[in-house]
Amino acid sequence: MNHAENTFIAHLIEMRDRLLRAILAIVIIFICLFPWAQDLYALLAKPMLAALPQGGQMIATEVTTPFFVPVKVTMMAAFLLAMPWVFYQAWAFVAPGLYQHEKRIGVPLVIASVILFLLGMSFAYFLVFPIVFGFIVGVAPEGVAVMTDIGKYLDFVMTLFLAFGITFEVPIAVVLLVKMGMVSIAKLREIRPYVIVGAFVVGAIFTPPDVISQFMLAFPLWILYELGIIVSMMITKSKPAPESDYAPMSESDMDAEFDRIEAGQAESGPHNAK
């Protein structure tokens, strides 16, 4: 077995170990949180319950749903709490292969990624959910009681959590694209109108069909895109191109150089003849 194969196997072993550490952290936190699984689901369902009419409630249409839905919520909470440790394991795996300047920018980006993702979820929970659920209940036809299945509700809020969490990662993506040289800041400014249109398209896909919730996803996406451009400008130092020592020779310089070469050949001719 040659050195390359040994190195590849060593990397696989390290990746396995760090993956196991990340999973173990999630499992330990999940076990600690499991006794409060029902409370965690009640906290997640609070925005919907607050929007329902007086006496409204949520329902479970499957036999096992009342057990598995709170378990899924607890697993999500465990992953969120373990996210800094999970990101650290991923960073520790890739860091040895990075240059020093890449490490310097990598640590702040990892920390910012975790914070921005959590901020995106918080934005959805505290600001978007009350408006969205209030809209859904408000447009229900007369005589229709809104009673959402807890499994369907979990799928819906997970989709919004993921959409807003990824949306809040836009500044990180912009900074990485600029640092890797894949796009320039001038190009980012040039495509701004397309980004704004795309933001509203994304808002229309991932939110209910009301203007307010679409705007609440599209507007932060646009603002975070602008923030990414500003941060990229701050961390990207424009270095002037190094001045070249080369300068074209004038005719007189070329004639002088030819004379020097001919004189050198004339001097070495008699010496070689001896």
Image (cartoon, rainbow, N blue to C red):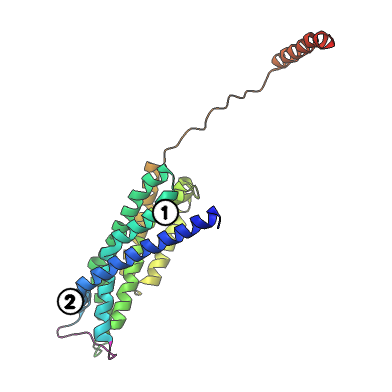
Q: Which amino acid is tagged 2?
A: Pro
**Which image quadrant: the N terminus?**
bottom right
Q: Residue at 20% across / 81% down in the picture?
A: 52
- Image position, residue 272 (x, y; %): 81, 12
Indicate which disc residue 243 carries. Answer: none
Q: Is residue 78 magenta?
A: no
Location of residue 110 by image quarter: bottom left
Q: Which amino acid is tagged 1?
A: Val
Indicate which disc residue 35 carries. Answer: 2
Q: How many marks?
A: 2
* Magenta span of residues: 54-64
- Sort mark 2 into few (<14), some (14-19) or many (20+) by Cα contacts within 10 Å: few
- Sort mark 1 into few (<14), some (14-19) or many (20+) by Cα contacts within 10 Å: few
Q: Nearer the viewer, residue 92 or 114?
A: 92
Q: Residue at 44% across / 47% down in the picture?
A: 179
Residue 143, above or below 257: below
Residue 185, above or below 6: above
Indicate which disc residue 94 carries. Answer: 1
Q: Residue furthest left?
A: 54
Residue 215 showing in the rendered view: no
